[in-house]
Image (cartoon, grey):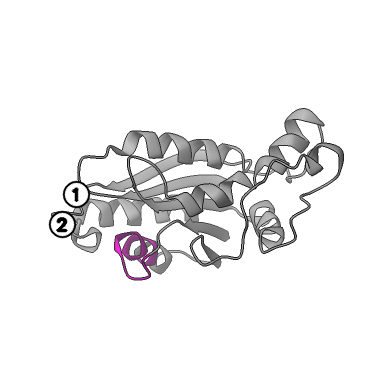
Amino acid sequence: MKTLIFNGSPRKNGDTAALVNELTKHLEGDIKVVNTYTAKISPCTDCRYCWKNDGCIIDDEMQTVYKDIDDADNIVIASPIFFSELTGPLLSVASRLQQIWISEKVKNIKVLKEKERKGFVVLVGGGDGKPGKALGTAKIIIKHMGTSFVDSVISHNTDEVPAKDDISAIENIKRIAQMMRE
């Protein structure tokens, strides 16, 4: 089993990391975490190279991530919620999925293997922002990685209770880990 996790948090020991760490404790197989704040991945510039050519013209770490997406059995989008949305660096990395979309939807060329990939979302946040918009965006990102959305875990009271102490979120993390192993 191969699991690819996109961590959209700027904090190495924050609430998102706590839930990602809890998840990885219960997983088996190969696990790769792409930390979008530190990854050397530029956003899509809409240069349209992928409209006429194979792949993306930007030669950075995303070239490896494309292969990781193709090989993954499970894909997780994990992010704090900033102003009711996923973080900017996570969205920048996701913008690079444009070349997959163009290949498959415009040029009718399959670039991802036909296989079942399970998609999950882990969101954390507090304050008055609502997770619905971020969850919707994450589901779209998952879909454009040739992945079926299965379930989510949301810890949305982190200004009162840290995610690591959110009993419901921890139990749901264990539950989705079990789904990934099935």
| Residue 161 magenta-highlighted | no
Q: Residues within 10 Å of mark 2 (few under 14, many from 20)?
A: some
Q: Specify whether 167 is left or right of 175.
A: left
Relative to residue 29, is residue 98 depicted above or below? above
Residue 76 appears in view: no
Q: What element does badge 1 sit on?
A: loop
Type of amino acid under label 1: Asn
> In this picture, is 33 found above or below 136?
below
Amino acid carrying mark 2 in the image: Val
Front in this rendered view, residue 122 or 40: 40
Gap in angstroms between the C-alphas marked 2 and 1: 6 Å
Q: Residues within 10 Å of mark 1 (few under 14, many from 20)?
A: some
- Dot 2 and dot 1 residues touching (CB under 8 Å): yes
- The quarter of the picture where the N terminus appears is bottom right
- Which circle marks residue 161 in the picture? 2
Q: Which mark is residue 157?
A: 1
At 54% from the left and 52% from the top, the residue drawn is 74
Instruction: Name the spot of residue 107 as percent of width and height, x first.
Output: 82, 31
- Which numbered dot is residue 96? none
Task: Please give the name of the residue rendered at 26% of the width and 52% of the height, measured from the top-left corner.
Answer: 169
Q: Is residue 12 above or below residue 43?
A: below
Of residues 136 and 69, the one nearer the viewer is 136
Picture coordinates of residue 44, whole percent (x, y): 65, 47
Magenta-drawn segment: 11-21
Residue 99: x and y, percent? 72, 42
Residue at the image point whose x is 33% and y is 60% from the top: 19
